[in-house]
Structure formats: C-alpha cells, structure tokens
Image: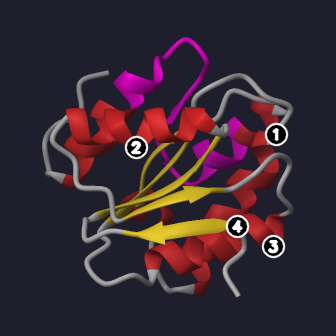
Amino acid sequence: MIQGKDVGFHGDLGLVIGAGGGSLTLTDAVRSHGGKPANYSEIGGNPSVAKACGLAKAVLEKDGVEKLAVMMSIVSNTRVDIVARGVIKACLELGKDPRETIAIFRIPGAWEEEGFKILRRYGIEYCDRSVSMHEAARRAVASVQGEEVAL
C-alpha cells in the first residue's frame, strides 16, 4: 500500500510533495523548468516517519526515477524533522545514498532547525522558507540534469 496519494507519470524526477493545491503548483513549476515529473503525490499534513518513508520508497522504486524532490509550497505545521527522517530512511533502505538521491528538500514547517540538522548530516541540499518554490523546482531539475546548481 502506498503511504499517501500518488499518480504516476513517465519522468525522471520523483516528487514527494504536499500542500493541497500548492502541490499542483509545484508539479507545474518542475515542468516549467524543463523537468519531467515521475509522479504527482500528496504526502498530507503531519505524516509519520513510516508514511514519509513509504511514499518516498514507492516513488524511488518507479522505473526511470533518478532523484527525489521533497517540497511543500507553503508554510505549514508539518514537522520537517519527521519528513527528513522518513525520506532518508527510504533512501538507506533501498541502498541509495541520500545525498545523491534527494535533489532538493524544501519544507517550510515546524521543527525546521532539527530537520535541517538531519539533512546537513547527510549532505542534502535543503531550502528554508526564503527560497521560493519555483527556485527550489529549478534547483531540483538542474540536479537531475547534472547541471551545477547555482545557489
């Protein structure tokens, strides 16, 4: 069972995203920067580590997925540390290096500093709320395309 809602496409950038209609905007932002989303997903508010891990694993196991973008478009009460733990756990359980697998992590939410410490420990690029969702999408697409990501 998939942990969250997920609809598949035929792209190379897996999306673990949230924020209701904002997640549609994030999908469009990826496309507007030349990206090819592998899916549309909605992680929902305040997921558990197990739910974040389950959805990330389901997305990463899709054919053609090279990297994962973890993004939310708006400030929410979602715990950044829990989502970070879940997606990192998914990478590790699949034998993937989180640093090489997670193209971008942008969730403006609760427990940000704790989440950012976890992401930093694994060398994952994260964005705080000062980085727009369109800029985060651009960085994710550039990462998949092997381009140098200008911060």
Q: Secondary structure at mark 4?
A: loop
Of badges 3 and 2, nearer the viewer stands 2
**What residue sits right under mark 2 in the picture?**
27
Q: Secondary structure at mark 3?
A: helix
Q: Secondary structure at mark 1?
A: loop
Q: Quadrant of residue 72?
A: top right
Say which label, 2 or 1, has the lower sequence index: 2
Q: Are marks 1 and 3 in contact (CB under 8 Å)?
A: no
Say which label, 4 or 2, has the lower sequence index: 4
- Can residue 25 be seen here? yes
Q: Which residue is at the front of the view, 99 or 3? A: 3
CA–CA distance in space, label 1 to label 3 = 14 Å
Of badges 1 and 4, nearer the viewer stands 4
Q: Name the residue type under label 2.
A: Thr
CA–CA distance in space, label 4 to label 3 = 11 Å
The x, y position of residue 3, in whole percent, is 72, 74
The quarter of the image holding the C terminus is top left
The x, y position of residue 61, in whole percent, is 44, 84
Q: Name the residue type under label 3.
A: Ala
CA–CA distance in space, label 1 to label 4 = 14 Å
CA–CA distance in space, label 4 to label 2 = 16 Å
**What residue sits right under mark 4 in the picture?**
4
CA–CA distance in space, label 2 to label 1 = 19 Å
- The image's mark for residue 50 is 3
Say which label, 1 or 3, has the lower sequence index: 3
Looking at the image, the residue that sits furthest to the top is 130
Q: Is residue 110 left or right of residue 116?
A: right
**What residue sits right under mark 1 in the picture?**
78
Q: Name the residue type under label 4.
A: Gly
